[in-house]
Amino acid sequence: MKIELKKDFKWALVVPTSMGVRITPVNGQPVHSSSMFMMHVSSAESNVASVSSFLGLPVKVLTTFVKDSPIARMIKDNLAGRHIAYEGIEVEQGSPWGYRHQFNIADSGYGSRGPRVQNDRAGEVGRTLNVRDFDLNRLFVSEGVQILHLSGLIAALSPETSNFCLELARAAKKHGTRISFDLNYRASFWLNREKELSAAFAEIASLSDILVGNEEDFQLCLGIKGPEEGGKDLAAKIGSFKEMISRVKKSFPGASVFGTTLRQVISTNEHLWGAIMLEGENWHVVEPREIHVLDRIGGGDGFVGGMLYAILKGWEPEKWIQFGWATGALATTVVTDYAEPADEEQVWSIWKGNARVRR
């Protein structure tokens, strides 16, 4: 089946997000014993958008900035360099203890030492995202959007952002924009807000055309029974994952595409990477295959970004999961946490297992 997309549009993909920076030690070292770090712009949702933006589709993020902040300037310049348009108000910092952009401090791990990530989100300006700061009629009617991609990270960030995502989803549905929702459960975001967020996530999921999540996401965000335990062999558990996705589809029949990634960690730098997608009544499976990992952060976002790009391009459904698998694998080979595909050929070479030199 094909997902029918708007024909008259300015934006292929729009994503709400809270932008920040990621700080990572060089040479795969731990944070606590490092003296040299790289800092780059990051957010899960802009990571998804990067696949389409680097491959030439018109993409926009909806966000908010700290006024006169050098980090905000860095973020804007980075988004421009990624060919991503942005829209968002400027918020006064207020004081040294006021608003700021989030910091993500990440040890990538190496070999037998697993990654460790610390989120430092005190005073995060993205928590103030509010629907009144955006003209939804202009966005969805005058300009037009093919796919709105929402993340559970933004939907759970604060009561304001939960309402923001709900209003975006309602407006998108009203005006014929397709909705993609990656559940992205985080326990710390849900603490003491379980009832409120369960209701919000269920409504967004009910409006969505594309639902993405892992077994924990579907269980803890939507209350869907997860896959049966079956040891560490992912390939042997694929049937159980299919049963879980079938339960999600039964609970949210308005969606037509359901996806989940499969990951088995052999070591920090060697994973088995696979995926399952249900499109209509058709199953598409990528059996777990070995990939070599420089930094695992962003692999899941890369998968979603590639899958959405393939849908936007109008390809046959079997290519959606293949391209998503390959862009997810691509994201794990770079020091940023977003994929920067040079062209479609590079992505398909990854899918085919062709790592030979191209001259």
Image (cartoon, rainbow, N blue to C red):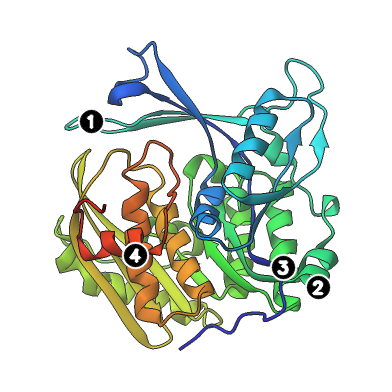
| Residue in view at x 64 percent, y 36 percent | 77
**Secondary structure category for the residue under label 2:** helix
Q: Are marks 4 and 1 in contact (CB under 8 Å)?
A: no
Measure how far apart labels 3 and 4 are at the Cα level.
Answer: 39 Å
**Secondary structure category for the residue under label 3:** loop
- Which residue was labeled with disc 1? 110
Label 2 packing within 10 angstroms: few (<14), some (14-19), many (20+) = some
Q: Position of residue 256 (x, y in %)?
A: 49, 81
Label 1 packing within 10 angstroms: few (<14), some (14-19), many (20+) = some
The image quadrant that residue 239 belongs to is bottom left
Measure how far apart labels 1 and 2 are at the Cα level.
Answer: 48 Å
**Secondary structure category for the residue under label 1:** loop
- Which residue was labeled with disc 2? 141
- Among numbered discs 3 and 1, the one appearing first in the sequence: 3
Camera-near label (3 vs 4) is: 3
Label 4 packing within 10 angstroms: few (<14), some (14-19), many (20+) = many
Task: Residue type at mark 4: give it.
Answer: Gly
- Among numbered discs 2 and 4, the one appearing first in the sequence: 2
Task: Residue type at mark 1: give it.
Answer: Tyr
| Residue in view at x 69 percent, y 31 percent | 72
Q: Is residue 212 above or below residue 356?
A: below
The label on residue 199 is: none
- Which residue was labeled with disc 4? 226
Q: Are marks 2 and 4 in contact (CB under 8 Å)?
A: no
| Residue in view at x 70 percent, y 75 percent | 173
Measure how far apart labels 3 and 2 are at the Cα level.
Answer: 10 Å
Measure how far apart labels 3 and 1 are at the Cα level.
Answer: 43 Å
Q: Is residue 194 above or below residue 92?
A: below
- Which residue was labeled with disc 3? 10
Camera-near label (3 vs 2) is: 3
